[in-house]
Image (cartoon, rainbow, N blue to C red):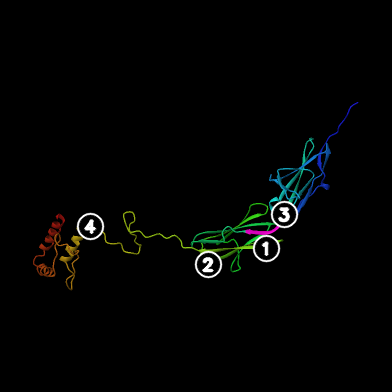
Amino acid sequence: MGHLDVVVPPDIVNEDTSGDVMVPEGGTVKLTCRARGYPTPHVQWRREDNAEIVIREASGVKTKVSNFQGEFLKLTKVTRSEMGAYLCIASNGIPPSVSKRIMVSVHFHPVIQVPNQLVGAPLGTDVTLECHVEASPRSINYWVRDTGEMVISSEKYDVQTISKSMFEVKMILNIRSLAKTDAGSYRCVAKNSLGEVDSSIRLYEIPGPTRKPQPPGRFNPPHYDEEDDYPDQLGSAEQEAEEEMTNIVADRNPTRGGPHPTLLPPGKKNNHVVFSEREAESDDSSSAATSGVAPVATLLVALLLLAI
């Protein structure tokens, strides 16, 4: 006589197993998972994201577990943090084990949190405004100015929406090159089938950083515009000699119609020969008689000055 056992791997009975469910925040949901096979399968529950399952007793005791044993999983006073996928896993020692994914959606009206409700920035800088939105089902999010105008992405504005979780969204509004007309109130609005909420952010101008003027020095030379004349500067010895030659020749050959003013700088008496108006007139009267002497005298005087 012999004994034969026929083993059967586990299988989920879909007709008797819960599907995706929706529950309002604070409500209660009961999940069922039935499996068949031989030996009789064991059923356990765990969250797909490996977060803890919160079990609340009627007495008010709350227990957090990584997995829960049994065909039935009852969640009471459900919160938004318990939203997600739950896995029903059936096993009886005969491979393979089987599982079913059940999605629990927790619905609630939108909530907005604003980190900074008052934002100041200097003119010409870029400004970022932020709003954190929580909503389920997903909300429609947008920005509105105090004038009632909806803010959309453009050369002036950059509107972004970043998803952080199944029900969390971060709204970002970047304002480029802040101008006086950009100051005012900006509202972030979130709307879903359960309600609508908004929050305001006040944007204002603050004085920008100013640089104190520094006196000209060794490492801070004076600045001159291209249209302005540069101040007189001392030249080289050759340039001074050429200027002295120009002054002497100009004094020896004054323009007709009267004496011309001296071109020598004032105060230089020791090393310069200054010709007066009377000397110029006497030179002109004797130039006809001694036409060959004047150029030689001028050249000698110039050489004398260069030697000094």
Q: Secondary structure at mark 2?
A: helix
Say which label, 1 or 2, has the lower sequence index: 2
Q: Secondary structure at mark 4?
A: helix
Q: CA distance from mark 1 to mark 3?
A: 17 Å
Q: Amino acid at mark 1?
A: Glu
Say which label, 4 or 2, has the lower sequence index: 2
Q: Amino acid at mark 2?
A: Thr
Q: Secondary structure at mark 1?
A: strand
Residue 181, numbered label: 2
- Viewer-side label of 4, 3: 3
Magenta-highlighted residues:
105-112
Q: Residues within 10 Å of mark 1 (few under 14, many from 20)?
A: some
Q: Quadrant of the N terminus?
A: top right
Which residue, given by chain and number where applicable, does mark 1 sit on? 196
Q: Is residue 287 magenta?
A: no
In the rendering, at what x and y percent does residue 293 appear?
10, 62
The residue depicted at 72 percent of the width and 54 percent of the height is: 106
Residue farthest left in this picture: 289
> Is most of the magenta stretch helix, strand or loop?
strand
Residue 239, numbered label: 4
Q: Amino acid at mark 3?
A: Val
* Residue 117, image quadrant: bottom right
Q: Amino acid at mark 4?
A: Gln
Q: Secondary structure at mark 3?
A: strand
In the image, is 212 to the left or to the right of 281? right
64 to 285, vertically: above or below: above
Q: Residues within 10 Å of mark 4 (few under 14, many from 20)?
A: few
In the rendering, at what x and y percent does residue 50 appear?
69, 44
In the image, is 197 to the left or to the right of 96? left
185 to 72, vertically: above or below: below
In-front residue for pair 135/259:
135
